[in-house]
Image (cartoon, rainbow, N blue to C red):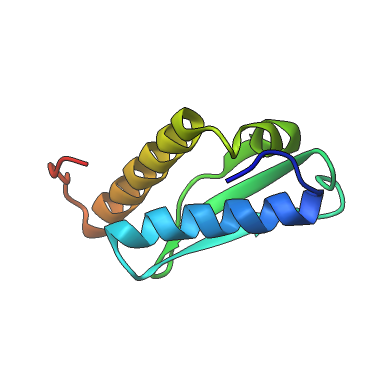
Amino acid sequence: MFSGGTYPEVARWLWNFLTAHAKRVDPRFEVELDADDEREGKSYGARLRFLHHLGPTMEFEFRDVADNRGSLAWCSALAERTKRSALELMSAHRGTADVRKL
């Protein structure tokens, strides 16, 4: 992996990364990435979708993602955050607490 990149390249990387880690929890997860005109060049908003349920928006600064996507520690923390968010959304959908360990 490497750091840097243009806004669209980093957006594509972020969407792929979040999708891959959410689908490890359940293949039915999808990721909605908001990179509209107001955000362009500055930030991204990402939401996990499980069936018809949307999770809260996760905010990402463009420069933070671009500078750190080559960092193993940063990517590991983001992977754990994504899996935890996916498990929480699944639990809310089922109406029960999910006690599985990551």
Q: Would you identify the image quadrant in which residue 13 lies?
A: bottom right
Q: Would you identify the image quadrant in which residue 29 lies?
A: bottom left
- In this picture, residue 27 sits left or right of residue 77: left
- In this picture, residue 44 sits left or right of residue 52: right
Q: Quadrant of the C terminus?
A: top left
Q: Residue at x 16, y 40 (%)?
A: 101
Image mark count: 0
Reply above or below: 90 against 100: below
Asked whether 41 or 71 is in front, the reply is 71
Asked whether 12 or 88 is in front, the reply is 12
- In this picture, residue 61 sits left or right of residue 72: right
Q: Which residue is drawn at 74% across and 40% down?
A: 4
Image coordinates for residue 36, horizontal then vertical, percent = 80, 55
Residue ranking furthest to the left: 99
Image coordinates for residue 88, horizontal then vertical, percent = 31, 45
Q: Which residue is drawn at 13% across and 44% down?
A: 100
Q: Would you identify the image quadrant in which residue 61 lies?
A: top right
Asked whether 90 or 15 is in front, the reply is 15
Image coordinates for residue 14, horizontal then vertical, percent = 60, 51
Residue ranking furthest to the front: 1
Reply above or below: 47 against 70: below
Q: Residue at x 81, y 49 (%)?
A: 6
Image coordinates for residue 32, horizontal then vertical, percent = 58, 60
